[in-house]
Image (cartoon, rainbow, N blue to C red):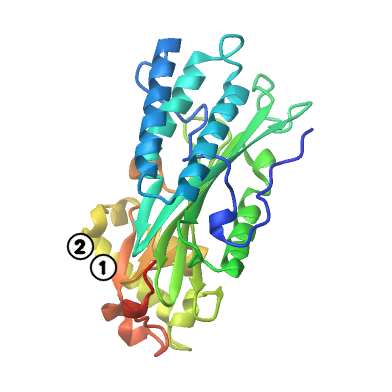
Amino acid sequence: MRSRIQLPNTTTLTTVVLICGALALSRGYAETPNAAGSSSADVQQLATKIDQKTSEMSRALSPAAHDARQRSLSRFYQWVEGYCGVPGATSDPRCVHDQYFNYLDHISQSVYSVGHWKVYETAAYGLLWADGDLLDQDFAQPLTWDLQVTWPHVDAEPSPISRKMGWALKEKVHSLVADWAVGGWELNVSNRVETINACYASVGIEKSAYGGGVHSNVEFEAFNWNRKSDALLNIADLFKPGSDWRHQLVALYEKHVRAGDSGVRPTILEDEPFLTKKILELGVDKETLVTDQGLKIVIGGLAPAYGMILPGIEMKWSELQPLLAPSALCTIADTPRP
């Protein structure tokens, strides 16, 4: 059995992985138009569009970042060959079509702005082979398991993301993918930078696991960092000691949901009566991101009807202020520009 893939050692997020471009969803996830009748012409047309779109999105990046994404794209094509079969021989045209289609769909989201900073994505792809039915679920299931990890890089030198934060996020992701071979056939972990200001940085981690059936299981975790102390930020550190901030924060969340904020349907509180209780049980830290404007709660693990992950509900610093410790508020005016 091949050893599972591991993220390489790093000093900053800008040098963690220079392997693949944006996340491409796996077989079993993709439902693309005309996939059943895919041909080499369809696949080549998608490849041309991928090359063009990747080049277009990379124009806003530095030469080093542009080169990194080109190497990522090359790695992606190699991965598809290994996953779907060698073109012209044993390849599965529908599999190739689905991978290309999903990759193309994500390219526009793979370069984005966070405050004054430009962030771009690459991804690590891994494939594990087994000599038997490791999952003990379906003897007819092909003996391959797929791992994909999408990684963010800040296009700046020096990076506003410290070496220590880069290591901490890497270890966090390692803990999430450690059981991917026994937890399901396919696992995608996407890391997206949400905030970089003078005081805080935050990353939203979306974990999508597929182990058979119709839908994957999707979870969300927040990763928050205190840039002033260069240490992991616990949400509790933002609030006055001894206060019942957890219940009050969840009460504010429920208030915003009832108001229909951020596109969350108010009826979800009736459809999912234990939704706010779930936030408390899972731990508010796990689902709360620090932003420039306040705190945002994002909930995953819901039924597909709700999109697996709810749009984030943000509570402003101004409405949180009665609950906050004096040191919590961050002045972002002094955030250095790249």
The residue lying at 43 percent from left, 66 percent from top is: 288
Query: Percent from the top left, x then y, of residue 233?
Result: 52, 74
Give residue 335's position: percent from left, percent from top: 37, 75
Vertical placement of 219 versus 116: above or below? Answer: above
State left or right for residue 172 relative to residue 244.
Answer: right
Q: Which mark is residue 255?
A: 1
Q: Residues within 10 Å of mark 2 (few under 14, many from 20)?
A: few
**Residue kind at label 2, given as amino acid type:** Ala
Q: Position of residue 183 (x, y in %)?
A: 64, 41
Instruction: Report the residue at 54% width, 28% height from top.
Output: 77
Helix, strand or loop under label 2: loop
Report if the CB atoms under discs 2 and 1 are less than 8 Å apart.
Answer: yes
Q: Which mark is residue 186?
A: none
- Residue type highlighted by circle 1: Lys
Q: Identify the mark at residue 259; answer none if there is no mark.
A: 2
Q: Secondary structure at mark 1?
A: helix
Badge 1 local density, few (<14 within 10 Å), some, or many (20+)? few
Left or right, 256 with respect to 222, comes to left
Cα separation, mark 2 vs mark 1, equals 6 Å
- Name the residue at 53% across, 39% down: 72
Q: Position of residue 207 (x, y in %)?
A: 52, 48
- Residue appearing at x 32%, y 50% in the figure: 271
In the image, residue 268 sits, relative to residue 276, either above or below, namely above
- Residue 209 in view, yes or no: yes
* Displayed quadrant of residue 31: top left
Residue most toward the left? 259
